Image (tube, rainbow, N blue to C red):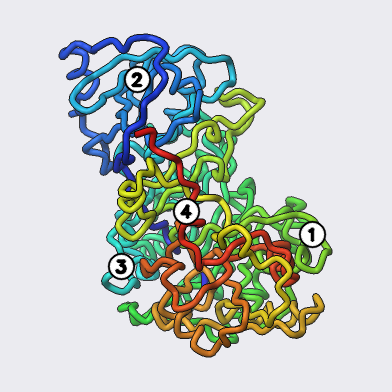
Amino acid sequence: MEVKCSCCDAAVACNAPGTGDRDAVRLGPAKPVSSETAAAGLKRDSAPRSRRDVSDRSAPVVVGLTPFGAAEKAGVQVGDVIVSMNGRVPRDVIEYSLLADSTLIDLHVRRASMDLELRVEKDDGEPLGIEVSSAVFDRVMTCDNHCEFCFIYQLPKGMRRSLYLKDDDYRLSFLYGNFTTLTRFTEMDLERVVDERLSPLYVSIHAVDPKLRARMLRNPRGATSLRWLRALLDNGIEVHGQVVVCPGVNDGGYLDDTLAGVLDEYPDLASVAVVPLGVSRYSRESAMREHTMGEIHGVLDIVDRYQELFLSTIHRRMVFASDEYYVMAGRDLPTAEAYEGFPQHENGIGIARAFRDVFLGDSHEEWGTTSGFFSWVDGAPAAGYRAIRSPGGPAPAQRNPYSVDRVVPASDPAGVPERAAHEAGVERVEMLNQPVGLAAGQGPRGRKGPVVVLTGAYGARLLRPLLIAGGFERARVVVVENEFFGGNTRVAGLMVASDVARALQDVSAQDRVLLPDVCLSGGHFLDGVAVTDLPRAVEVVKTDGHALRRALLGESDYQSSSSASARFNLVRSSG
C-alpha cells in the first residue's frame, strides 16, 4: 500500500504563533509605523482569486531566532508578525526566502499592538536568522477532487482535524514532494513556477484517457488538467508522475494505455511511480478493493515491459513499481542500478533495495526516512525540503535559498507540547532531526541483550531474511498488525501507538525494542499518542540500513523513549 496520499496529500496551514518572548539585542531604535501604512500593509486582498481557497492571508510569525544573527541584531523578537519585507507581503516561504536573500531588508513587523519598522543589514549570502511559523502564509489550496480511492476519506473518526484536510497545492508539491492533480492549477501558477523555477514538482496522473481520469478524480477538470503537465515540461520544469492502480479501474489494459500515453505525450517526465491502492477498513467505496495475486503480477509484468520499451526509445526506464508490489508478489527486488538514482525514494520506490544494500554494506549511500503519508501536516524544517531550484532561477547558484531559515511546525494539540514547554520556562520546542533517546549515560551502547525489531507486515517479509544475511540471527522481528486502519495497511509508516502497545505485550521486559522513526511525527504516532506514553521504553531508530545495523550492534547513539526530557532541544527563555 502506498504510504503517501493517492490522489493528493493531507494538508493544513499551520499559522499559529510561537510561544514565549525574547529580549533581542537591538542595534537601533525601532521606528513606529503610521496607522495608514499599517492599515495598507495588513489590508486583505479583496480581488477575486480564481478557484482558490486563500481568502484570508496569515502573515508569518517569528518562532525562533539565530543567536546573534542578522535579524536578532536588528531587533526582531520571537512572536513578531512579519507584515511585509521591503514593502512586499510574502504569500509563502518561497517568496519569503527570495526576499530574505537581500542584503538590506526593511521589515514591517507587528509586536503585540504596536507596528514597527526594522532595518536588517547583512552580508551577501548570510542567512536572515529567522524561523517562521509555516510554509504557506495564505491558505493552502485545498483539493476539490472526490477520488473514491483517496485515503483521507478512509480515516477513522477522532483523529486530529488537520489529518482530514487535503491539499492540491503546487507549492507543497515543490516544498514537500506532495502530489498534485493540477485540477486547480492556473495560468498565474504556471507563470510563477516557470519564472521562479520551482522544480521539481510531483503530479498525480492515474490515467491519460480524459474520461477515465475525470471519472477517477470525480471532477470534470480531471479530463483537461494534464494540459498543465505538458506546459510545465515544455518550460523545462522537472516533473515526477504517479499512477495509483485501482484494481478493475485503471489496471490491466488501462495501465498499458496510460504508460503508452506517457511515452507518447510526456516522454520528458523525470520518472513515473506505479503504486497500489491503499484500502482501510473504513472505506465506503464498494469498488475499491485489494489486488488479487494475479493482478499484482500483471502490474509488475506491464512495468517490466515498459521499462524495456522506455530503455530502447529514450534510454532510461522512467517507470518504476513500488516496493509493495515486489513484496506482495514475492519477487526479487530490482538492483540499485535499475532504480536510476532512486528519483522517487520517498514515494516508496526502491526504499527496500536501498535499505538492504546499506544494511549489508553493499552501498555506503545513506537514504533518509521516507516522509510518510501525512508528512507535511506537522510542518518540516526547510533544511529537509527535497526540492531545489532549477538552473536559471533567480536564486544564488552557490546555495539553496530554502535552507536558509528553517520552517518549524506550529503548535498542535496532539503534536509538540508547546504549552508544557512554556510552563517549564522554555521559549520554544525545537524537534531534533534524530530519533529520541535516553538521558546521558543510559544509552544502549554496548548492550548485548536480545533485540526485537518492530515493523509492519510488509517490512517483516524483508527484515527477517535480511537480519539472517547480516549475521543477526538472534534478533527477532515482531509484526505490528494494523488494526487501527485495517484493510491492506501493512506498511511501517502507518503503525500507531495502540497497535504497537498490543504487539509489545508479547515482548519480554529484558528485550531491547527497536522502533523505526518513520511511524512518528514530532514524537507522536498518527493516533496522537506520544512514543513516551507506550507501556514500555523503546529505542527509536532512524529508518535506514546503517542506523539499524548500529542499533543491533549496540553502538547506536540514539536514545530511548523512557526519557521525555531528552526528546527535545530546548531553547531557554531569556525571562
Q: For this view, does 362 lie left or right of residue 290?
A: right
**Which numbered disc, 3 or 1, marks the residue closer to the eye?**
3
Q: Find the distance from the CA under tag 3 to the CA under tag 1.
A: 40 Å
Compare residues 166 and 493 and report the one nearer the observer.
493
Q: Find the distance from the CA under tag 2 to the CA under tag 4.
A: 29 Å
Q: Is residue 219 visible?
A: no
Compare residues 271 and 523 and report the one nearer the observer.
523
Mark 3 or 4 closer to N-term? 3
The residue tagged 1 is: 337
Mark 1 or 2 closer to N-term? 2
Which residue type carries mark 4? Phe
**Which numbered disc, 2 or 4, marks the residue closer to the eye?**
2
The residue tagged 2 is: 88
Dot 1 falls on a residue whose secondary structure is: helix
Residue sitting at x 73%, y 69%: 446
Tell me the quarter of the picture where residue 127 sits: top right
Dot 4 falls on a residue whose secondary structure is: loop
Which residue type carries mark 1? Glu
Q: Position of residue 202 (x, y in %)?
A: 52, 50
The residue tagged 4 is: 179
Mark 1 or 4 closer to N-term? 4
Which residue type carries mark 2? Arg
Dot 2 falls on a residue whose secondary structure is: loop
**Which numbered disc, 3 or 2, marks the residue closer to the eye?**
3
Tell me the quarter of the picture where residue 335 sits: bottom right
